[in-house]
Amino acid sequence: MDADLLRSANVIHEILRWTASVGTMAAGLVLAARVRPRITGWAFVVLTGASIIWIVIGYLTAEYALMVQNVVVTLINLFGIYRWLIWKGKV
């Protein structure tokens, strides 16, 4: 039973890792392409979701440097969401 549980946990970790990786790469591509501001804002939403997944992965695997890094990245991404989707001031 323990082997099955460990195998299931590894599968979940792998799915989370791939989800976070693909989300980060796709949103990074959108940011690099300098598309419309609204789309840029949504790229920051995707990046925020991906960095939250990385925080969870860091917690589940006791990779605390990964957690801390992505807490900071999440805060930066939240600023990006504010900047591109919420703030209505001039640049």
Image: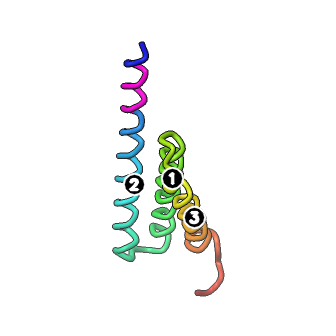
Cα separation, mark 3 vs mark 2, equals 17 Å
Q: In which quadrant is the C terminus drawn?
A: bottom right
Residue where numbered disc 3 is placed? 72
Residue 10 lies, in percent from the top left, at: 38, 32
Magenta-colored segment: predominant secondary structure = helix
Asked if 91 appears above or below 80 in the picture, the reply is: below
Cα distance, mark 2 to mark 1?
Answer: 8 Å
Q: Which residue is mark 2?
A: 23
Mark 3 or 2, nearer chain start: 2
Q: Amino acid at mark 1?
A: Gly
Q: Observer-nearest residue: 7 or 34?
A: 7
**Mark 1 closeness class: few <14, some 14–19, many ≥20 residues within 10 Å:** some
Badge 3 density bin: few <14, some 14–19, many ≥20, Cα 10 Å? few
Residue occupied by mark 1: 49
Q: Are marks 3 and 2 in contact (CB under 8 Å)?
A: no
Q: Disc number at residue 62? A: none
The colour scheme of the drawn protein is rainbow
In the image, residue 68 lies at what x, y percent?
A: 56, 58
The answer to whether marks 2 and 1 mark residues whose Cβ atoms lie closer than 8 Å is yes
- Describe residue 28's horizontal placement relative to residue 59 as left or right: left
**Tag 3: amino acid:** Val
Q: What residue is rendered at 47% in x and 41% in y?
A: 61
Q: Which residues are magenta?
A: 4-11
